[in-house]
Image (cartoon, grey):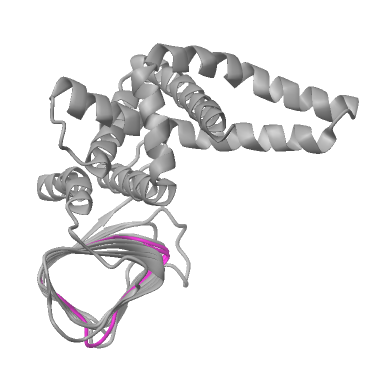
Amino acid sequence: MKKYFYSLLAVAIMLPFGIASAITMAEGESILSQGVPIEGNAFLAGSSVTIDNEVNGDAFAFGERIYVNGKINGDLICAGREVIINGEINGNIRCASEEIKINGKIERSVLAFGKIIIVEKNGSIGRDLIATGQEININGIVAGSLDVTSSILKVNGTVNQNINFYSEEQDSSNVGLFLNSGAIVNGNVNYNAFGEIKNNGGNITGVTNKYIPKGENKEDVKTIILSSIGFIIAIILTTLAIVVIGGSGVEDISKQMTSSAWKSVGIGAISFFMLPIIGIILIITGIGAFLGIVCLLMWILILLLSLFFSGISLGEILIKKILKKKASKFLVNSLIGVLVGYLLLMIPFLGFIFFILGLWWGVGGTILAFAEKRKEIE
């Protein structure tokens, strides 16, 4: 258990630094065609991302569809609706996607979050596969252990170490762990689920341990860890999207928040209560129903973004004003600040105070930046 806890913790800590250090950007492009290898890290984003050549570093891919057909001599960090890996990854994979298909060779470990995760017949993972999803299919080779939280796990290939399966689904013929003909498990099977393993001709060389899932109020430690790491990765990816898409606008908001912190908090506190009241009054009185709806929608949007803006600004304060690193990149500061802010929110009692202050700070800073921009236009 400790091994996986520290490995997942390392993912959470190192991921933002890895993303922020991406030095080879394909701006406006979503394809790395065959040809001269990319020296250093590669960053790709688009509706469709394809990597056909060799990357001598880490690859960061974000898009609706991601295809890796080439070779990556480092880690792959990605998020999308569909991820298909046909090539070779000489490092680790950390991926969040609706559907993930591995049809190539992965030298190290895979950390995957998705609805459907498949290791195809020609696919292989050199170390461990840690996955959370609705359905997971292993048709190829997992050289290490298989740690899965899902409704369905189907093994048709080979797992060279232990299988650790966890599910709270009620036992039925359609859910659980299926060891089909041709499945080989060269280790133990730890089955933490209702019912029994559906062994349809699979071979287990170790022992089978059956556990009863704990109740909702007594969650498995591993489940909590996986859920937390998944949430942290989602936060990191959202921060990355906000900074990249928002561009200079996000930097302007951050400048307002860091230069006029308490002013931002004060304006944010007033706006937090007044904007929804104004919107409701406009709708009820009929003076401006459409304007009232817009006001409420804007209020909701600002609330959703305010905590991220607070984390981004916190990073700027920590790095530039406390650590005095003037040359530090805005993206690096943003990711560090958001993670630090997340940790602060986890503190009992004080976390709630930080949450409220963060909301007000972000709302006020957004309004101040908007007002400043209007002055420049006028």
**Which residue is depicted at the point 47% across and 72% down?**
173
Q: Is residue 309 visible?
A: no
- In the depicted view, which residue is nearer to us: 103 or 137? 103
- In the depicted view, which residue is nearer to us: 219 or 90? 90
Image spot of residue 74 (x, y percent):
11, 66
Q: Which residues are magenta?
A: 114-135
**Which residue is depicted at the point 19% across and 57% down?**
22
Please tell me whether residue 120 belongs to the stretch shown in magenta. Answer: yes
Image spot of residue 2 (x, y percent):
11, 44
Residue that lies at the very extreme toward the right in this rendered image? 286
Above-or-below relation of 309 to 197: above
Which image quadrant for residue 107? Answer: bottom left
- In the depicted view, which residue is nearer to us: 175 or 290? 290
Residue that lies at the very extreme toward the front in this rendered image? 378
Q: Is residue 218 visible?
A: yes
Left or right for 96, reference 2: right
Please tell me whether residue 316 belongs to the stretch shown in magenta. Answer: no
Left or right for 338, reference 256: left
Left or right for 210, reference 244: left
Quarter containing the C terminus: top right
Above-or-below relation of 66 to 276: below
Image spot of residue 316 (x, y percent):
26, 29
- In the depicted view, which residue is nearer to us: 258 or 299? 258
Above-or-below relation of 279 to 84: above
